[in-house]
Image: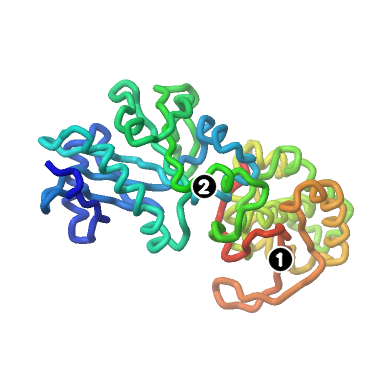
Amino acid sequence: MNLQEIIIQPVQPGEQKHFQSLMETHHYLGALPKIGHTLWYVASYRNEWLALLSFSAAAWKCAARDQWIGWSYRYQYDRLHLIANNSRFLILPGHHYPNLASRVLALCERRIAQDWQERFGYPLLLLETFVDPQYFHGTIYRAANWLYVGDTRGFRRTRQGSRQGYSSTPQHPKRVFLRPLTAHAQTQLSQPTLNPFYCHGAPKIMLTAEQMRSLPQFFADIPDPRRKQGQRHSLATILAIATGAILCGMEGYKAISGWAQDLGPKARERFACRRRNGVRQVPSCTTFRETLIRVDPDCLDRALQGWNAQFAEEDEGLAIDGKTMCNAIDEEGRQVHIMDVVGHESGLCHTQKKSLPCR
């Protein structure tokens, strides 16, 4: 076989069922559904399929990868879209030729950044993959010049009902391999301010436990405009959660409410959420809307100036301004008022917002 004649192309819609069937039959982990941004590739020789590859969203957490990049945890969630995970790689039975796997990986590396840009609207800087040493040694990745940067801790993602988390005990650690797609990938991912060319959506930062606990204190002296009858949540907690949501990229009452609902027990405690029947409750979408409409914008602005003085001088991503009010249309088409509270992050892009809970 002449390896120079191998071609690699994205799987076409009419080929996806066959791709999944082969992956389910021959890959030891089975097939993966398309969740989020995913690209499937097929490598072929004279129209015969030789290998299948799947690239999908990067892992949220990976200590070995994060240490190699050297980025701050506060901003890594704003840059994960620049990494794709090689979640499946299958050489089909009967086609285990010398150097085939490294050739296929090299062909993928040459085109995936452009394919990703065309399909999803932003480029890639880095590829990652996890190799289970119970079955493989990562030889093909080493041969293709991928970097071995360490092992995972062995915790795997789990889901209990509507909540996601990680297993309480480690399973089998996997080897972590990385492949930079440009010479400056590590620098771009780790620098304090992300180049606007690589931005996608709104900035998605993380708040520390100290910041979450301190937010309600800044709103403690604001006069409560609500009637006392029927109050279930303190004004300070409502404003603190709304501010945290906006800092983490939310825009609009439904987005703020959804972010609040995703808060875990520890985060709810830090925001001083009221406990009811043993569970800390968060405000509803209606509560956020009715409260933010009525709160005094001057008092709100003074409170946020105090926040800026304490936290934003060293981290511009935490700067927030609550004085200006503007009109906006909510998702159901009604005219409402909403705080014009915008994080002023130097050099960062500000477009549509995406949900990311601070845990």
Q: How many residues crowd around disc 2 within 10 Å: few (fewer than 14), some, or many (20 or more)?
A: some
In the image, 190: left or right of 4?
A: right
Q: How is the image coloured?
A: rainbow
Residue 139 vertical position relative to residue 191 in the rendered view, above or below: above
Give residue 191's position: percent from left, percent from top. Answer: 64, 46
Quadrant the C terminus occupies? top right
Task: Specify which label sits upstream in the sequence, 1 or 2.
Answer: 2
Question: Of tags 1 and 2, which is closer to the observer?
Answer: 2
Q: What kind of residue is marked 1?
A: Glu
Give residue 261's position: percent from left, percent from top. Answer: 58, 50
Task: Please indicate, yes or no, whether residue 233 appears anywhere in the rendered image.
Answer: no
Residue visible at 36% across and 53% down in the picture: 112
Q: Quadrant of residue 94?
A: top left
Element assignment for label 1: helix
Residue visible at 49% across and 51% down in the picture: 81
Give residue 310's position: percent from left, percent from top. Answer: 85, 47
In the image, 9: left or right of 194?
A: left
Residue 251 vertical position relative to residue 75 in the rendered view, above or below: below
Q: Quadrant of residue 71?
A: top right
Q: How many residues crowd around disc 1 within 10 Å: few (fewer than 14), some, or many (20 or more)?
A: some
Give residue 37's position: percent from left, percent from top. Answer: 40, 54
Residue 231 vertical position relative to residue 252 in the rendered view, above or below: above
Task: Please indicate, yes or no, whether residue 198 appears anywhere in the rendered image.
Answer: yes
Question: Count of labels shown?
Answer: 2
Residue visible at 20% across and 38% down in the picture: 91
Mark number, residue 145:
none
Q: Which residue is mark 2?
A: 80
Q: What kind of residue is marked 2?
A: Leu
Q: Which residue is mark 1?
A: 290
Element assignment for label 2: helix
